Amino acid sequence: RKEVEQDPGPFNVPEGATVAFNCTYSNSASQSFFWYRQDCRKEPKLLMSVYSSGNEDGRFTAQLNRASQYISLLIRDSKLSDSATYLCVVRNAGNMLTFGGGTRLMVKP
Amino acid sequence: NAGVTQTPKFRILKIGQSMTLQCTQDMNHNYMYWYRQDPGMGLKLIYYSVGAGITDKGEVPNGYNVSRSTTEDFPLRLELAAPSQTSVYFCASSVTGELFFGEGSRLTVL
């Protein structure tokens, strides 16, 4: 089993739709969780950290379920500019950061 | 704001050649990382460093070497290039968990 797993997609959604991605992790001792966004042929950039209580940033909501060992990202009112690959990142002891394979989102007009 | 700078951005190597990918950061971050990303895949950790003089293997270290003589620099060396090392290489640094990436180095081994 991979340490961090994501559905690769692609998720094809119309503008204005709500879409959700999940990411599962295998190490129950994982300490911190993040969502990164990566545009085609570019470097990943931090989208948001994921806190235990859940957190929201505009149209984006991230949640953590430690019992089931998954994190989620919800995007409301999708925009064309949201089209990208979303990477789940898990931090373990020693500041080791492990990436999931990414979920590709395509928002269509 | 330089952040993390990688050179070269593109390189074509012949099988068996060696080269060094340079990475430097000006944010005084202790942690630095090298990842590789194959087409359509996620990032895999090659090596990382928690500070000057300290390096550790990641998930896919074979065929690579690193050094960390200063806080700023974290070069990645390929000794005997192989076609399997064709990939995009990202250097990153962090202090609190957020990673700051360089723009990537696209390496092709023919």
Image: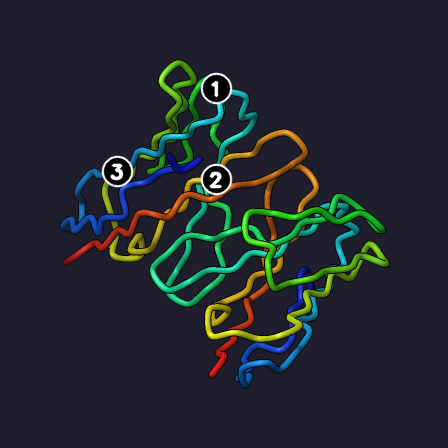
Q: Residues within 10 Å of mark 2 (few under 14, many from 20)?
A: many
Give the label on residue A89, or none.
2
- The percent position of residue B36, horizontal first and vertical second, equals 52, 60
Residue located 62% across and 59% down the image = B91
Q: Residue under circle 3?
A: A76
- What is the secondary structure assignment of the residue under circle 1? loop
The three-letter code of the residue at mark 1 reads Ser
Q: Amino acid at mark 2?
A: Val
Quarter in which the N terminus of chain B is drawn = bottom right
Residue A1 point in image, percent of width and height:
37, 34
Above or below residue B25? Residue A63 is above
Are marks 1 and 2 in one subunit? yes
For mark 1, what is the residue? A52
Q: Is residue B9 placed above or below B84 in the rendered structure?
A: below
Say what amino acid the circle numbered 3 marks. Arg
Say few, some or many: other residues with alpha carbon within 10 Å of mark 1 (under 14 / 14 to 19 / 20 or more).
few
Q: How many C-alpha atoms fall within 10 Å of the one at disc 3: few (<14), some, or many (≥20)?
A: some
Give the tally of numbered discs.
Answer: 3
Task: Specify whether B33 is left or right of B14.
Answer: right
Spatial CA distance of label 1 from label 2 is 15 Å
